[in-house]
Image (cartoon, rainbow, N blue to C red):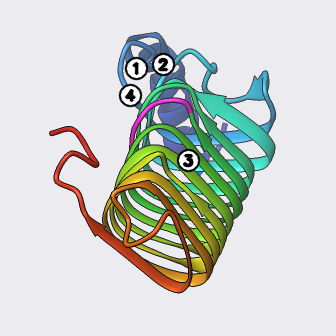
């Protein structure tokens, strides 16, 4: 073996020896073709950068998430850019995509064609914005909230409880302190 290849070989060997110990911690990098064909198993967390070529899924994601379909089973913290950003838990950060779905609480900015969150605090900008309990701004063609503490700007604005009217064109608002549980 030449002198130039020895440091590389030693580095690879150390990485292979250390890899099982690293398996118990958050992983700093993920590449996924389609789950389960990915570097980090879907039942483990990624804290760093995740690249999902077609579809990637992990339990927790913290950092930068990029791909066609970005799926997080529990919570997401960071920036997600994809065609679909799906989080089954809570999101804190920024989601930019065609479809952004947060099944838990959302705090930050949803920017896409369709944005949906179970509850939220921040800004949703899209064609359709949906959040049963929301605090902040919804800007789109159709905005929907069961309860809201904030403003909706769009063609159709629906606040079912506490809005100026349940349905308003162009603008609707509510100052409902019970919109998002603390």
User: Does the magenta-highlighted stretch encompass residue 98?
Assistant: no
Residue 151 in sight from this viewpoint: no
Element at label 4:
loop
Q: Give the residue pinned by disc 1.
A: 22
The label nearer to you, 2 versus 4, is 4
Instruction: Say whether marks 2 and 1 touch (CB < 8 Å).
Output: yes
Residue 11 % position (x, y): 48, 35
The label nearer to you, 3 versus 1, is 1
Q: Which mark is residue 26?
A: 4
Element at label 3:
loop
- Asked if 9 appears above or below 171 in the picture, the reply is above
Label 1, label 4: how far apart the Cα atoms are? 8 Å
Sequence-wise first label, 3 or 2: 3
Q: Give the residue pinned by disc 2.
A: 19
Residue 164 % position (x, y): 37, 72
Q: Residues within 10 Å of mark 3 (few under 14, many from 20)?
A: few
Residue 36 in sight from this viewpoint: yes
Label 3, label 1: how far apart the Cα atoms are? 29 Å
Sequence-wise first label, 3 or 1: 3
Label 3, label 2: how far apart the Cα atoms are? 25 Å
Q: Which mark is residue 3?
A: 3
In the picture, measured across the screen, residue 143 lies left or right of residue 37, that is left
Label 2, label 4: how far apart the Cα atoms are? 12 Å
Magenta stretch? 88-92
At 67% from the left edge and 36% from the top edge, which residue is drawn? 1
Sequence-wise first label, 3 or 4: 3
Label 3, label 4: how far apart the Cα atoms are? 34 Å
In the picture, measured across the screen, residue 85 lies left or right of residue 14, that is right
Instruction: Say whether marks 3 and 1 touch (CB < 8 Å).
Output: no
Sequence-wise first label, 2 or 4: 2
Query: Which of the two residues, 130 or 45, is positioned nearer the viewer here?
Result: 130
């Amino acid at each position: 073996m030449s002198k130039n290849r020895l440091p590389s070989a030693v580095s690879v060997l150390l990485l292979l020896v250390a890899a099982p110990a690293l398996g118990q911690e958050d992983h700093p990098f993920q590449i996924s073709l389609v789950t389960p064909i990915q570097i980090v198993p879907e039942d483990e967390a990624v804290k760093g950068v995740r690249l999902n070529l077609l579809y990637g899924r992990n339990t927790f994601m913290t950092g930068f998430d990029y791909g066609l379909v970005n799926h997080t089973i529990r919570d997401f913290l960071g920036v997600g850019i994809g065609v679909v950003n799906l989080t089954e838990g809570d999101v804190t950060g920024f989601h930019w995509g065609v479809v952004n779905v947060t099944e838990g609480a959302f705090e930050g900015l949803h920017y896409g064609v369709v944005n949906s969150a179970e509850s939220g605090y921040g800004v949703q900008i899209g064609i359709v914005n949906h959040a049963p309990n929301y605090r902040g701004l919804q800007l789109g063609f159709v905005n929907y909230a069961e309860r809201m503490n904030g403003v909706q700007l769009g063609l159709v604005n629906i606040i079912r409880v506490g809005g100026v009217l349940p349905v308003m064109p162009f603008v609707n608002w509510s100052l409902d302190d019970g919109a998002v549980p603390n």
